[in-house]
């Protein structure tokens, strides 16, 4: 049974701030770190950890998206279109997760982290190579542009491959419901590599999307009474603090370097989760 | 005419309102809960619900904005997402 001691309170708050910073920098909800932290460090049952993580993802997404939409970084048309299949996947994932034993869920989580770690590493190393297609030729309603302070210029881009991206979004959504992650770890590379959206816009749009996918899954957990209230409140407070801090501090930082660090972190967490699931 | 900037502002305000309302309720609920008051748990639940309903409110605003702007395809996509969120509340 989890007890909210002064030490746990401080650890949760600090971890929430870290997750918020992560979310605003990389367009992910941070569930890939939050669930292992709650299970491994605090001994929370995995279903409750997933539920708390989903609530925190909604907080990160809402806070960061509010600013990214105003800055024109998030591509709302692209986001709402991908949200359709993502939401279907989220509901399906949450319903399946509730029927799975905790050990199997932990094993699935650990196995999912390995490809995520590789993907992050590759993205961090090759980010500059995967430059976006400039908008031109046949225009679509999804094409957009944003101001990149790192480049000091407006960056127009064309969006392609929407059909396969929608299919992959379904799987991103199902990961959200099943494992308590927002799915940003899948959405960002899909938008960047498959759709041709520049990294910053992909991260911002992903943040926009994951709020809906996490909320769709979180409703299922909330109705089943699986959300630990006090713990979630502390994490959400930390996450919101970290998100608002990150929005302003990390706006001009190149996210590629951070990805290499997070890739290594994910690998460590994956090994720990795998060892615990047996 | 409903401008893109007005639309972005509407979405931003909706999200921030939801976030701050939920934070207020969660912090009040947490304070009461830690002090042993029975009023803490309902406030925590209300705060959590406000947070979880924030993305749904944002999708509702997207329906309104795209409908007003005459972009019916995106209004329909937003409506489908809102309907799916409704389904997830019931299952």
Image (tube, helix red, strand yellow):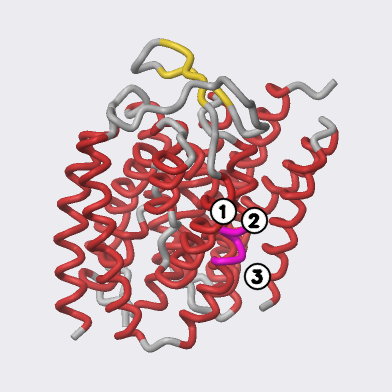
The part of the chain drawn in magenta is A85-89
Query: Which residue corresponds to mark 2?
Result: A84
Q: Tag 2 or tag 1, which sits nearer the N-term?
A: 2
Q: Position of residue B11 (x, y in %)?
A: 66, 36
Outermost residue, top side:
A152
> Do labels 1 and 3 touch, CB within 8 Å?
no
Q: Position of residue A64 (x, y in %)?
A: 48, 38
Q: Position of residue A203 (x, y in %)?
A: 42, 39
Up the image or down, A128 lies above or below A41; here it is: above
Marks 3/2: CA distance? 13 Å
> Do labels 1 and 2 touch, CB within 8 Å?
yes
**Mark 3 burial class by Cα count in 10 Å: few <14, some 14-19, many 20+:** many
Indicate the secondary structure of the residue bearing disc 1: helix
Indicate the secondary structure of the residue bearing disc 3: helix
| Residue B60 inside the magenta-drawn segment | no
Residue sitting at 32 percent across and 44 percent down?
A22
Q: Of A149 and A187, which appears nearest the observer?
A: A187
């Amino acid at each position: 049974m989890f007890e909210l001691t002064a030490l746990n309170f401080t650890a949760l708050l600090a971890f929430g701030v870290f997750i918020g910073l992560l979310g605003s920098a990389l367009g992910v909800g941070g569930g890939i770190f939050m669930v292992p932290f709650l299970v491994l460090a605090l001994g929370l049952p995995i279903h409750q950890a997933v539920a708390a993580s989903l609530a925190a993802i909604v907080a990160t997404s809402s806070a960061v998206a509010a600013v990214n939409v105003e800055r024109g970084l998030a591509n709302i048309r692209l986001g709402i279109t991908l949200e359709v299949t993502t939401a279907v996947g989220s509901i399906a994932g949450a319903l399946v997760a509730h029927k799975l034993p905790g050990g199997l869920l932990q094993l699935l989580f650990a196995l999912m982290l390995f490809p995520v770690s590789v993907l992050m590493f590759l993205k961090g190393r090759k980010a500059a190579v995967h430059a976006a297609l400039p908008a031109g030729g046949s225009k679509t309603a999804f094409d957009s542009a944003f101001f990149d302070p790192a480049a000091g210029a407006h960056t127009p881009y064309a969006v392609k491959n929407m059909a396969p991206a929608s299919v992959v979004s379904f799987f991103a959504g199902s990961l959200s419901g099943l494992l308590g992650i927002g799915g940003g770890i899948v959405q960002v590379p899909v938008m960047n590599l498959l759709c041709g959206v520049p990294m910053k816009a992909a991260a911002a749009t992903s943040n926009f999307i994951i709020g809906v996918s996490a909320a769709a899954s979180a409703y299922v957990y909330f109705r089943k009474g699986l959300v630990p209230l006090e713990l979630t409140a502390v994490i959400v407070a930390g996450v919101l603090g970290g998100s608002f801090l990150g929005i302003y501090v990390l706006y001009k930082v190149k996210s590629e370097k951070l990805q290499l660090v997070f890739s290594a972190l994910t690998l460590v967490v994956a090994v720990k989760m795998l060892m615990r699931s047996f | 005419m409903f401008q893109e900037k007005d639309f972005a502002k509407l979405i931003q305000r909706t999200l921030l309102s939801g976030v701050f309302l939920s934070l207020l309720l969660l912090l009040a609920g947490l304070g009461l809960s830690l002090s042993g008051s029975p009023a803490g748990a309902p406030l925590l639940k209300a705060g959590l619900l406000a947070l979880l309903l924030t993305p749904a409110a944002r999708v509702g605003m997207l329906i309104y904005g795209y409908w007003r702007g005459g972009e019916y395809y995106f209004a329909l996509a937003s409506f489908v997402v809102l309907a799916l969120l409704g389904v997830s509340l019931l299952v």
